[in-house]
Amino acid sequence: MKLHDAEIVDTFAEAFPMWGARVVITAETPEWALEAGRSMTGFATSVIGCKCEASIERELGPGETPDGRPGVTALLFAMDREGVGKRLVERVGQTVLTCPTTACFNGIEAEKTVDVGGQLRFFGDGFQASKVLEGRRYWRVPVMEGEFLVEERFGVVEGVAGGNIIIFAREHATALRAAQAAASAMHQVEGAIMPFPGGIARSGSKVGSRYGALSASTNDAMCPTLRGQVAHTDVPADVEAVFEIVIDGLALEPVREMMRRGLIAAAQAGASHVTAGNYGGNLGPHHIHLRELVP
Amino acid sequence: MTLTLTLREPPALPLQAEVLTPDRLAGARRTEIEALEVWHGNERAQLGELFDVSGDGDDDVRVEGDLSRVKLVGAAMSTGRLTVAGPVGMHAGTGMTGGELQVEGDAGDWAGAGMLGGRLVVRGSAGRQLGGVYAGDRAGMRGGEIVVHGDAGEQAGAGLRRGLIGVAGRVGAAAGLRMLAGTIVALGGLGARAGAGMRRGSIVTMAPATPPATFIFACTYRPPFLALYLRRLRALGLAVSDEQLDGRYDRWSGDGLELCRGEILILEDRRA
């Protein structure tokens, strides 16, 4: 299939279930909210090495937050509900509680919840206090600046992880430009995130390694520099660089929509090929075919 | 359509009418409603002897007339919406667990006392012991929301354990007396001895106030939780200003004779 001048490979992304939560962080200024959001979602690119995947979903105006202040929403994903709860307690506790002027709220109404504020309250060393409003419990944790307000329970839902597109171009600069254009277009979609830096991964991985201690290693079939060394390469002869955009969503539809927007934007920005990664259909129940996304 | 009960004339003696709840009235046939028993003074009477019944409705009930001598309207109601188009007597909404009771006039003493859930809205003023505690009970209001558009009498929120009481006007003496937790917001000011004996919880006022001598000044700051509560009260129709939403509050901790875990928050007086 051709889209603009790009070849859209007839393949599919193979996505699998992961549990996710949405965190709403507010602060006195948009800058502090963003700072806290970035800290909370830092070092959360891949569940393989970071125990979770997280990123800022979008910025919020004062009219969109529970306390009428500017804020951000962030999504965090882990392999199970317990994992989401643990990572939230660690990350909210170390990066949001500590950040000046912030407060932290649940951003998903869900049947299943995990305890976050109910754990972080213990930082108050007995001086913490709770408030219940409209059936939701909040904890007021005294801190040197004043008080940190955090909601007790956060909703968790079974989401979809592993959506992806892989972008090729004949020149490195073009590949990066196409990937950036794709990430920018994809960022507009709510309910899904791209957990890698700027949304873009330059180091896609394959399962396993010749070294027993590693569960993943470089995707040699996608490395242009290895074209002459590997038995099989997926890099066309005229391609100079490859980037991958990985997507996690609270549901399948936002993942599909992100892929659709990214595919179009990358093709428009000069990608020579757009493909997707899968495991032969054996890993995940969600197969998102690129041919269904091409307009 | 709304089920409407109209009080023919104010009763000569107090009327005890805990049957006036959506739980008992909604979906019932007119003959069943007219046969419901009430106490008129020390005599039993049937509702139909005192009220005209018209219309029907699944969970929306309206009671019209001067009910200032009718007690226990909406008591223990758990669902639906009950509107009193005028004043209502003592114990309105006491022990209610859900639904919404709207009083378009004044409410007598003990409105919402021992309330567990739901919402009580008083368009006029409320008497003493709003959301209060009955003698012998461990706690007063234990959940839900009370919104009063006028003033409230003495001992509003006495024994309060959980829930929100918002009053647009002034609250009488000893608001939050021996309260255990929960939140009282008095936009128009507090009477004397507010928070006396309180263990936990918050009493908030927008007018200058002098806490009891057993309260200790802590600091002036913006309590993050308060924005949620004030925005909620604004959504419920109280005139919360931007200055109050964004303002700084003096925090007084008390009561020092008890746990000293409660607080009185007073909007910073910028004229000082």
Image: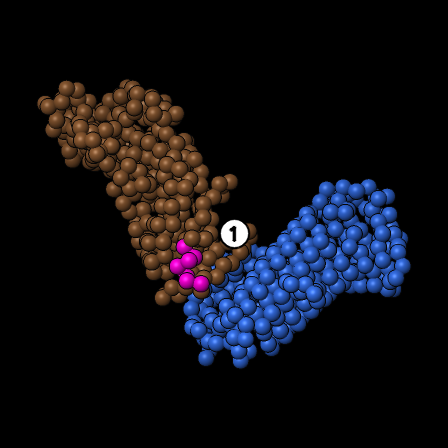
Chain colours: A brown, B blue
Q: x, y percentage for residue B156?
A: 64, 68
Residue positioned most to the front: A212
- Graded by Cα atoms within 10 Å as few (under 14), some (14 to 19) or many (20 or more), the crowding at tag 1 reads few
Query: Which quarter of the figure is the C terminus of chain A placed in?
Result: top left
Name the subunit of mark 1.
A
Locate residue B95 relative to residue B201 in the image: left or right.
right
Q: x, y percentage for residue B45?
A: 88, 55
Q: Is residue A91 above or below residue A244?
A: below
Query: Which quarter of the figure is the N terminus of chain A placed in?
Result: top left
Per the image, the residue denoted by label 1 is: A136
Q: Nearer the viewer, residue B99 or A59?
A: B99
Locate residue B145 relative to residue A41 in the image: left or right.
right
Locate residue B64 relative to residue A46 in the image: left or right.
right
Q: Is residue B40 above or below residue B209?
A: above
Does the rendering let one see residue A80? yes
The magenta segment: A120-126
Q: x, y percentage for residue A74?
A: 37, 45
* Element marked by disc 1: strand
The answer to whether residue A124 is magenta is yes
Query: For the point 36% across and 46% down, which residue is it?
Result: A87
Determine the image quadrant of residue A166: top left
Query: For the point 38% across and 26% down, which residue is it?
Result: A286
Q: x, y percentage for residue B1?
A: 74, 43
Q: Is residue A295 above or below residue B238?
A: above
Query: For the point 65% across and 70% down, which residue is it?
Result: B155
Does the rendering let one see residue A68? no
Query: For the point 32% across and 23% down, which residue is it?
Result: A12
